[in-house]
Image (cartoon, rainbow, N blue to C red):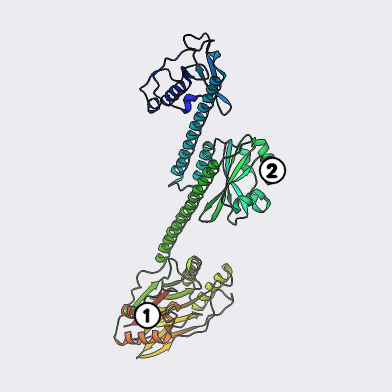
Amino acid sequence: MANVNDYLDEQTLRSIQRAFSAVLGRTVSIHTPDGREATPSEAKPSHWDAAFGAAAAPIGHKTPRTFEAPVHLDDELAGWIRVEPDADEPDASALAVEQQNVLRLFAGVLGRLASDGMELRRRVEQLLALQHVLAEITGVRELQQILDAVTKITVDALKAKAGAIRLLSHDGDELVIRAVHSISPQYLDTDPIPVSDSPLDREVLAGREPVYVADVTTDPRVVYQATARREGFVSGLCAPMIYKDHREGVLRVFMDRRYEFDWFEKRLLQTIADSAAAAIANARLYAEAQDSWEMKRQLALAAEVQQRMIPQTAPAMHGVDICARYIPSQELAGDFYDFIPLPSDNVGIAICDVMGKGVRASLLMASIRASLRAHAANIYEMSDVLGRVNRDLCADTVSSDFATMFYGVLNARSRVFTYACAGHMPPVLVRDGQLCQLETKGGLLGVLPDMIYPLDRLQLKSGDVILAYTDGISEALNFKNEVYGRKRIEEALLYAVGQDYTAEGIVRYCLWDLRRFAGLRRREDDRTLIAVKIR
């Protein structure tokens, strides 16, 4: 029930009452719809009292002799204005017609003041609802939590029957239901709405203002008219959810009657929709950041596992000095080197370069390394080792997955080095200040399953140095886009050998010379080096 007391405080009502009394020259009282006095007690004179110079007058009780005019608030009785008769009058109903009309006018003014108070309170409540929306979604990172809060608060703020949010699919072709309030669960099962099939949604998404629908059950722009009828919807208002010119979706509210939304309600809905769109975009960015962080964490864990596959120390061999370095260009790499202990003072030395970089290359690298170790430990003939590694790779991968490898077995006692090459650039041998390449013919791993890998043998002697490397060394670029190249590698190697550096010193110098050439340019490929020096 409407009541003037709900929208005008007692002091204001008392001031209005005294003003009316002063103008009419009669004792005027204001009552609630059930007849109770709206101003039952006296208060100190207000600024309005002073303006009219009215003295406090006693408030009478309703009697058959009173004259009264109803106060209406939006067509609903909200109170009465009553006039008591003077002492010498038998009946206040005998008021002059002009005075009666003035009293009715006063009742209309009071109703309007109460209506304005009601509207002001409603606006304040709506603004508080907007503040509530912002408070609810600010800092919230869970998308569904944001959507649920927005639909509920929007419905409450606009005193609507129900509300819903549909978000655009990733390709922007469909609107998918994501949140509802005061709607049956069946509504959540409605299919996505193709934007191309919905004139209403195309209109909403094309503009920046809410679109009004007088009756969603009959408007030809509405797709689910039967559903709207079942839910008891009549009028609706649809606002685009926009953040930085990017359309996120549509926010809808529905009334259960014919209702004309005013400008404030439309502005409020659009403000909520825009705020929600910003929160949705931030939630998605946060989710993407979380996914990225998790991916980086997983990559770091994978890189740690991969690093453990690379020998941290070189094998200790009498009369042989060995050093290796592995520098990945990303968290995960395709290069690797390995030292495989074998019977009778033999050790397998391998260097491999898998096509590509990143996760795919690292998985291939792990597969090739496992295959190499399995076959090297059980097969004596080196050609068969590479042949079986090649067949394993051909069986488990596609033709675009391939690798190069140089594999040799060094006997510490005899100093015989037996080696084979699978498409890898040949290592460099320095003997007595002269360079030669350890070349054998053998194709890439993972291309042809019946590939043959011939082997060769080399009798090493004191002072010999072998340097094996991957193409991340030879193909490194400087800021002039010049290639480091094999010639510079050989020059750096010769200098290091001439200085009688250890195997570690040779590797360090070669890498230093490469860094001097390339400068701070970003590494484009993995870099791997193995140096073997015979004492």
Is the residue marked by circle 2 packed among few (<14), some (14-19), or many (20+) residues within 10 Å? few
Helix, strand or loop under label 2: loop
The image quadrant of residue 159 is top right
Helix, strand or loop under label 1: helix
| Viewer-closest of 32 and 464 | 32
Left or right side of 497 for 272: right
Q: CA distance from mark 1 to mark 2?
A: 73 Å
The x, y position of residue 260, in whole percent, is 60, 38
Q: According to the image, label 1 marks what residue?
A: 514
| Viewer-closest of 484 and 14 | 14
Nearer mark to the viewer, of 1 and 2? 2
State whether residue 213 is above or below residue 87: below
| Viewer-closest of 90 and 283 | 90
**Amino acid bearing label 2:** Asp
**Amino acid bearing label 1:** Leu
Badge 1 or badge 2: first in the primary sequence: 2
Q: According to the image, label 2 marks what residue?
A: 219
The reply to whether residue 207 is in sight is: yes
The quarter of the picture where the C terminus appears is bottom left
The x, y position of residue 164, in whole percent, is 58, 42
State whether residue 351 is above or below residue 234: below
Q: Residue at x 59, y 27 (%)?
A: 75
Q: Residue at x 48, y 8 (%)?
A: 88
